[in-house]
Image (spheres, rainbow, N blue to C red):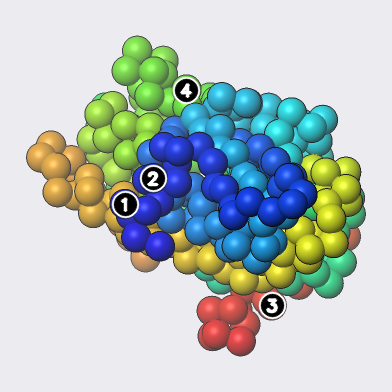
Amino acid sequence: MNRAKLLAFCVAFAIASPAFADEPVKLKYASPAPPQSLVTLWGVAPKLEEIVKASDGTIEIQNFLGAVLGNFNQVLDRTSSGVNEIAWGILGPYSDSFPQTDVPSIPFVAPQGHASSIAMWRLFERGVIKDDWGRFKVLALFNFPPASMHTNTKPMRTLNDFKGLKIGVSVRNVAELVDLIGGASVTMQPSDMYQAGQRGVVDGLAMAWPAFYPFKLQEVTKYHIDGAFGGTPSFVIMNKAAYEKLPAKAKAAVDKVSGEGFSGHMGTTTDKMDEDGKKRVEAMQGHTFFKLDPKEEPLWKERTKPILEKWVKSTPNGAAVLAAFQAEYEKALKGN
């Protein structure tokens, strides 16, 4: 699907199918991100179109983009209650309710989006993290590459550079990382970060590159450092009751597209978005970029080790889930 077609998909706010004797089931898709977000354009939209095509006229999907039906803090609960039937969102606001699925957010565990997304789905499919998702039909689980750190006040190269800085975060484990390296985390939705940076409420932000253009964060930051500071586990879900009410052909279409293929596609999308977002900012004047020095990384890992230890201890079967995830992640990196 080319970009023009994807834009038409979003502007039209509907995917329609040829008329049949029976009216198609209308499903509402909700995105808490702006309409121009590549998560929908490159990621979710093509897969929803696959579902519609495979349904042979039994499904129509209407699109509500830009937090029309719920922001990042609401979209999961709104899907559960039937305000919309399908949605994507980030796990950050709900991590307490989905502790096992939150494993890719641990710093230095999952630097790559595609491999971590495949690993997440395989853990779900094997039943390792399935208990987290009993009230939903899960279409895909995926992970954004690790958050980078961005400030508007001073360059960041070492642990000491973060002392006293207020950093806006949207993922719990990343918030703990910020606190452990001497900063002060301020939890907020991605959609609130621009205003927080513009008003000086925070000195910087922890956010993966895919969010920069949709939320215009390049306008409120100028120093950037990349490192495996913790991913952003995410989901594409469907209201379970709505799924169960679908006619057989429609249900089969959802089943056909859902799963490892959808998850891997979303992981590839987030990796592509990560590269695209960084390149766009690199092309601008006034921005300075750093990578975490390999000599510094062991210091960061040691300082943030309590995050991993706490996660293992507080998460049901934490050690087993972490080991299973790491094994599947390494397999996916090798293409297995």
Residue 91: percent from left, percent from top: 66, 43
Q: Secondary structure at mark 2?
A: helix
Q: Is residue 216 visible?
A: yes
Q: CA distance from mark 3 to mark 2?
A: 40 Å
What is the distance, in whole Å, between disc 1 and disc 4 at their CAs?
29 Å
Q: CA distance from mark 2 to mark 4?
A: 28 Å
Q: Quadrant of residue 153?
A: top left
Which residue is under mark 4?
192
If you read the primary sequence from the N terminus, does the residue marked by circle 3 or circle 1 appear first?
A: 1
For marks 3 and 4 on the same chain, the one whose residue lies earlier in the sequence: 4
Type of amino acid under label 1: Ala
Q: Nearer the viewer, mark 1 or mark 4?
A: 1
User: Residue drawn 84% across and 55% down?
Assistant: 247
Mark 1, residue position = 4
Residue 157 left/right relative to 304: left
Q: Position of residue 111 (x, y in %)?
A: 50, 63
* Mark 2 vs 4: CB contact within 8 A: no
The one nearer the camera, 126 or 261, is 261
